[in-house]
Amino acid sequence: MIDHEKFENVPFESLLGEHTLDAVDTSTEQIKDYCDRLESANCIRFRLDGKIYVALEDPDDGYRSAMEKLFVQDGEMRNVFPPIKVLARRRPNGRYAECDILELVDTANGQVVLAVGTDNSDDYYPWFVAEWKPQNMAQNKNRK
């Protein structure tokens, strides 16, 4: 279980710019809802410059979801790979909806390899974004 309330939120603005990414894990975690009941929430962990960041879902009501928070947590990573240089940037709003999403772009090829946040954030049905695309890493170009 993740006690997310004890961790301070990391604003996207503090991560903008170039970093080194060398690990990404995805999981489903148990968190407490507003009535202290346990519920399942999607989670993605990624290591930038040696720090592990955790993007945790607020599952809300089963139809709507959002990113609860982004925070730093100690621990071990399972999916570790040779480091790549990435550019952290905010995803621009879409044509019909606003978003609050952080993207990590492989600087070698300009492809988005990881995105976390909330899409459709200005609407009645927002959703949590936790996209991990290792196929977009330049070092995986010739792998099948």
Image: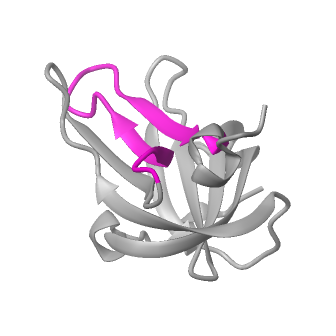
Quarter of the rendering containing residue 95: top left
Q: Give x and y (percent) for residue 65.
A: 46, 31
Give 21 or 141, whichever is nearer the viewer: 141
Q: Is residue 33 left or right of residue 112?
A: right
Front-lying residue, 66 or 137: 137
Residue at 33 percent of width and 68 percent of height: 11
Q: Nearer the viewer, residue 21 or 57?
A: 21
Q: How many marks?
A: 0
**33 or 26, which lies in front?**
26
- Is residue 60 rendered magenta in the image? no
Quadrant position of residue 10: bottom left
**Figure check: 88 above or below 109:** below
Q: Is residue 88 left or right of residue 140?
A: left
Q: Is residue 71 above or below residue 112?
A: below
Within the magenta stretch, is there residue 123? yes
Percent position of residue 138, x then y = 58, 51
Residue 9 in picture, x, y percent from top left? 42, 69
The answer to whether residue 21 shows anywhere in this view is yes
Residue occupying the point 78% across, 55% down: 1
| Magenta stretch in the rendered image | 109-134
Q: Residue furthest left?
A: 95
